[in-house]
Amino acid sequence: MIIKIYKDKASLSRDAAELAGGSLRTAIGRNGKARIIAATGASQFEFLDVLTAMAGIDWPLVEMFHLDEYIGLPVLHSASFRKYLRERLINKTGITKYHFLDGEGDVPTMVRKVSAELAAAPIDIAFVGIGENGHLAFNDPPADFQTEDPYLIVDLDEACRRQQVGEGWFKGLSEVPERAISMSVRQILKANEILCIVPDARKAQAVKSCFEGEISAMAPASILRTHANTTVFLDQDSAALLSPEQRKALA
């Protein structure tokens, strides 16, 4: 795993998008297509803005899966990750093949169907973030590091739900769904390459716990340290609590 620290969110996003764009072009050139996993949330705004504006990516050859979705949240709700991905990625690029997680209907049947599609071929690149509680996708602590199921139905902890309120997706905690669909930890780790985009001071404690503490289910994103081709992108704010030695070594 490689950790990179940038002076601000803008430079972080530019470098992460450059790496992502290069990886997408390489996969398309090698396989005639690219299969990706896309993250959502406020931490991905600038990164996706840069990536979707880049030239030279044959987006119709990209197949997209997403990490997670709330159960019972309408697709037109402002916090819907389907809405987010359609507006911030699909509509901007012309991706035609994508697999939405629909949390409104027969969720177990939908999970089985999308899981089969996901497991049908390797994933070239996964874009992920880290939650304020250290979660990876919606795998809140203590995360399940063992299951091989591609997607899980999970209960969201209060810290995770409060983060969604803090980011402005919901007006209050009572509005945040208590259950969600999440890609499993082991499925995320099957991606050939992982880009983890983590800006902002509110993520600093999670960054310290996940990248300086033990690899533990209580710090779910710490498992990324076991993946051979992961790059973590931090800004000065999210890296603020890392030890001086590590900050110096990574700068």
Image (cartoon, helix red, strand yellow):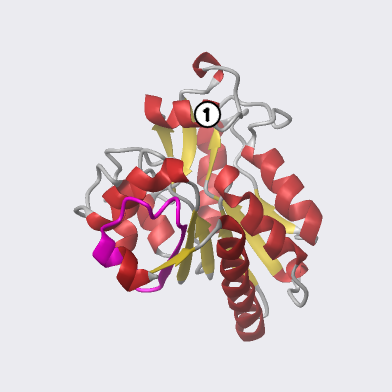
In the image, residue 232 lies in the stretch drawn in magenta: yes
Q: Amino acid at mark 1?
A: Gly
Left or right position of 237 against 47: left
Residue 135, picture quadrant: top left
Which residue is farthest top? 174
Which part of the image, by quadrant, shows the N terminus?
bottom left
Q: Residue at x 68, y 67 (%)?
A: 62
Is residue 234 or residue 221 the one in the foreground? 234
Is residue 154 or residue 26 the one in the foreground? 26
Residue 171, picture quadrant: top right
Does residue 89 lie above or below 251 as drawn? above
Where disc 1 sits, the SS reads helix
Does residue 182 lie above or below 66 as drawn? above
- Residue designated by label 1: 166
Q: Residue at x 53, y 71 (%)?
A: 124
Does residue 165 lie above or below 234 as drawn? above
Q: Position of residue 167 (x, y in %)?
A: 56, 33
Q: Which residues are magenta?
A: 227-246
Q: State whether residue 81 appears in this view.
A: yes
Q: Position of residue 227 (x, y in %)?
A: 34, 67
Q: State whether residue 147 appears in this view.
A: no
Q: Position of residue 63 (x, y in %)?
A: 66, 63
Q: Position of residue 58 (x, y in %)?
A: 75, 73
Q: Residue at x 42, y 45 (%)?
A: 203
In the image, residue 171 lies in the stretch drawn in magenta: no
